[in-house]
Image (tube, rainbow, N blue to C red):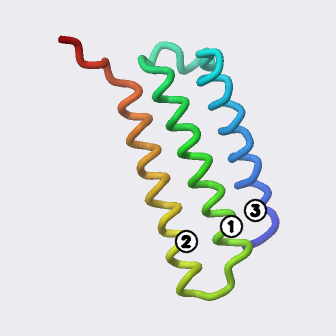
Amino acid sequence: MSSYVAALLGSMALLATCGAIATLGWGWLPPWLRSRILRPALFGWAQLTMTAALVTQLVGGLLIRRPDIHFAVTMSGAGVMLLAIGLIGQAQRQPLRR
């Protein structure tokens, strides 16, 4: 992995972490997301999950040299990223009421 891609992944992970802290700690959302996100706490957890996926991709690309382990780590990062996308989709839905 080139250093440019590693720097991009690292900065994206840092930005997602800051957004997750702001959302989970204070319930703050960026103005362009306020009309779409109906469950901010779930969105904050989705951001933390996205951070975990980006860090997994970063570790898999930078530190692991064996091809079989590299493939397993990067694919697990992709799976965690799909989970985060699903959580973001659920954060945009209305919660069930009884």
The residue pinned by badge 1 equals 59
Q: Quadrant of residue 89?
A: top left
- The amino acid pointed to by label 1 is Val
Q: Is residue 79 left or right of residue 22?
A: left
Marker disc for residue 95 = none
x, y percentage for residue 50?
Answer: 56, 46
Residue at 56% in and 82% down? 69
- What is the crowding at mark 2: few (fewer than 14 residues within 10 Å), some, or many (at least 20)? some
Give x and y (percent) for residue 48.
Answer: 58, 40
The vertical placement of 83 against 94, above or below, is below
Q: Residue at x 68, y 38 (%)?
A: 17
The quadrant where residue 59 appears: bottom right
Query: Looking at the image, which residue is at 50% across and 29% down?
Result: 43
Residue 57 placement, left or right of 18:
left
Does the CB distance between marks 3 and 1 fall below 8 Å? no
Do the residues bearing badges 1 and 2 touch, measured as CB atoms within 8 Å?
A: yes
Residue for badge 3: 6
State the image coordinates of residue 81 (x, y, percent, origin top left): 49, 52
Between disc 2 and disc 3, whose residue precedes?
A: 3
Q: Earlier in the sequence, mark 1 or mark 2?
A: 1
Reading the image, the residue beneath label 2 is 73
> Is residue 49 found left or right of 1 in the rendered image?
left
Label located before the other in sequence (3 or 1): 3
Where 40 sits versus 63, above or below? above
| Amino acid tagged 3 | Ala
Q: Amino acid at mark 2?
A: Val
Secondary-structure class at tag 3: helix
